[in-house]
Image (cartoon, rainbow, N blue to C red):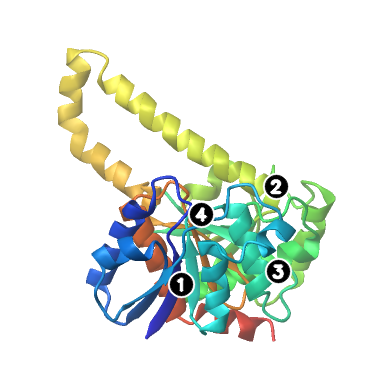
Amino acid sequence: MIKLAIDLLGSDLGEEELIEGVKSFLKDHDDIILHLFGNEELLKKHFNTDKIVIHNVSKFVPMEVGALQFLRMKDTSMYQAISSTMELELDGVVSAGSTGGFLTGATLIIKNIPGVHRAGFCAPFLTLKEGKQVAILDIGASNINTPEDLLCFGRLGNVYAKKMWNIEKPSVYLLNNGVEKGKGPDEVKNAYTLFEQCENINFKGNIEAREVMSGEADVVVTSGFPGNIYLKASEGMAKNMSLLLNNAFRHSLMTKISYLLVRKQIKRMKEIMNYKKVGGALTLGLNKVVVKAHGNSDAYSFYHAIDLAYRMASVKMTEAIKKEFE
């Protein structure tokens, strides 16, 4: 039986939208108990099942919050969801609230697995190969990382790809501004040497940003600052391409007719690149499964965030990482 804590407060679209995602998830899963943190009166209207445990909370963590400030917010849904993951021995926690607050709280309360000196904030990205994803980490948990941090991220991503995607020897790359060994800042060049010396990783060298989503790589390692820029740039590019495509087909009567001829292919393309299927990002290297859903999650996206946490718990991701870092 998988047990997860679900923080329902603090998202852009509100509690009702996330509740719909929870309801859809329950329809598809029997071996689950969800601890929901939110408005008790509202939750009781939607749920009457032994799969749900309701925790009444009315306050949420604001978007901008520091570590000390978060530790004083014990009456918020996010704090209680994270702390209950440890106190009630749950398998993991999911939240669509404040990213900074969630990462801070998870790190301070759940803590790193022994041997993991820097947990990695990881985003599974869709690629041009249908059904294939690539894990990119770190995507912004910290701005500056050492070569040892990058190697740690590589080891974490390697375990994730093995367990979640059943890849025997995941292809691991370093994100860089060129494929040559001597390219990039010192921490990347020094990390390259560390990766070459690590026998447990199938290290393939450097990869440029334009090739990340080609489907060649299984894991791409980067420092948090460029990783977050890559994340935001990719999201912006996808949004802009969608707008340009829509405008192009609406330009004239002929383009509208042309759309009718290719709409099945366009629909398939959008489905392949639908980021909502991923559900969100995750923090690898903590003592529990920790999934950060998109702040603007709708029911569909939140369903997949819960499903991501469920699948990670099912394959015993935390135990696999503990074994790697023993």
Q: Is residue 92 left or right of residue 154?
A: left
x%, y% of residue 105?
63, 65
- One can see residue 137 in this view: no
Residue to which mark 3 is pinned: 152
Task: Please tell me whether residue 64 is drawn above or below residue 307 in the rendered image.
Answer: above
Q: Which mark is on residue 182?
A: none
Which amino acid, by three-letter code, is at mark 1?
A: Ala
Q: Secondary structure at mark 3?
A: helix
x%, y% of residue 56?
43, 68
Mark 2 vs 1, N-terminal side: 1
The quadrant in which residue 111 appears is bottom right
The quadrant in which residue 37 appears is bottom left
Q: Between 44 and 289, which is closer to the camera in this rendering?
A: 44
Classed neighbour count for the residue bearing mark 1: other residues with Cα under 10 Å, few (<14), some (14–19), many (≥20): many
Residue to which mark 1 is pinned: 5
Mark 1 vs 3, N-terminal side: 1
Which amino acid, by three-letter code, is at mark 3?
A: Cys
The residue lying at 37 percent from left, 32 percent from top is 242
Quadrant housing the N terminus = bottom left
